[in-house]
Amino acid sequence: MVNKRQKTEGAKKTATTTPKRITAAKPKAAARSAGAAPKAKPAKKKTAGPSAISTDDIALRAYFIAERRQQLGLPGDSLGDWIEAERQLLGERVTHGVN
């Protein structure tokens, strides 16, 4: 026969030795196989036009244009640097025959 003290000690022991784990709910196998495709990575943003250039490429070129402009002490702003970067990149595509 178990006395009252052993019952409460046993309850305390299990509460401290078995911590509860909180896990995120996983999608069920049926839901995954029912045509739900995994999410694809988003493509790079592109400007409109036949020979589109990614905004990342334009931003990088505009950064270097701005750096050079500031080193030389020339007037200008970030919008002008962006437009110049687009112009240069589009010109390089036409010159090199890349579509």
Image: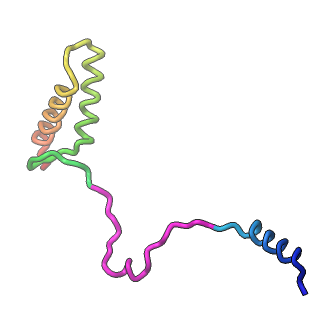
Q: Residue at x 22, y 45 (%)?
A: 54
Is residue 80 depicted above or below 27 in this figure? above
Q: Residue at x 21, y 22 (%)?
A: 77
Please state the extent of the stretch shown in magenta in the rendering.
21-42
Q: Main secondary structure of the magenta part?
A: loop
| Image x and y of residue 59, in percent | 26, 36
Q: Is residue 36 magenta?
A: yes
**Is residue 47 rendered to the left or right of residue 1?**
left
**Is residue 11 rendered to the left or right of residue 96?**
right
Q: Residue furthest bottom?
A: 1
* Quarter location, residue 28: bottom left
**Is residue 30 rendered to the left or right of residue 82?**
right
The number of numbered badges drawn on the structure is: 0
Q: Residue furthest front?
A: 4
Is residue 78 depicted above or below 25 in this figure? above
Q: Residue at x 19, y 47 (%)?
A: 46
| Image x and y of residue 5, in percent | 88, 74
25 or 51: nearer the viewer: 25
| Image x and y of residue 53, in percent | 18, 44
* Quarter location, residue 90: top left
Its colouring scheme is rainbow
- The quadrant the N terminus occupies is bottom right
| Image x and y of residue 14, in percent | 77, 72
* Quarter location, residue 16: bottom right
Q: Is residue 84 magenta?
A: no
